[in-house]
Image: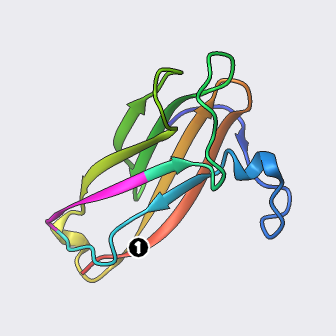
Amino acid sequence: MPEGKINKPVDPKNLTEGEKKHIPVISVPESIVAGKLFDVTVQVGSIPHVMEEKHYIEWIELYLNDKKVGRAELSPKNEKAEATFTVEAEKALAGKEGKLRALEQCNIHGLWEEFMDIKIS
């Protein structure tokens, strides 16, 4: 996993504008079935992050239960600071909960993360 200081919100219930632009937003289907592919979209920020030459998102990574399932390299040429990953939850996870972890690297404001618990049928 990437090393370095991971930025976290000072007060998760009252996010600053900067935090709203950097904390990843994870979107998954309502139903996730073990052994079947599903898409996970990670958007950087509930307020979309800019993708400009001087300020942009360098990459986004996605983990399922601490196993890296994808990495998207981004640049200012990307229209949006987001990526969609196709993921397969192992059959052994059927009937269990899993944890998604999204990491993103801003060229100015560093590393940010977000987690989401998912139910796998």
Residue 29, compared with residue 104, is above or below; it is below
Q: Is residue 38 magenta?
A: yes
**Image spot of residue 26 (x, y percent):** 48, 59
Identify the residue at horizontal 56%, vertical 39% (top origin).
104
In the image, 2: left or right of 98? right
Q: Is residue 104 magenta?
A: no
Secondary structure of the residue carrying numbered label 1: strand
Magenta extent: 35-41
**Image spot of residue 59 (x, y percent):** 49, 31
Identify the residue at horizontal 27%, vertical 73% (top origin).
32
Identify the residue at horizontal 20%, vertical 63% (top origin).
90
Type of the residue with mark 1: Ile
Q: Residue furthest front?
A: 79
In the image, 23: left or right of 81? right
Residue 100, compared with residue 53, is above or below; it is below
Magenta stretch: helix, strand or loop mostly = strand
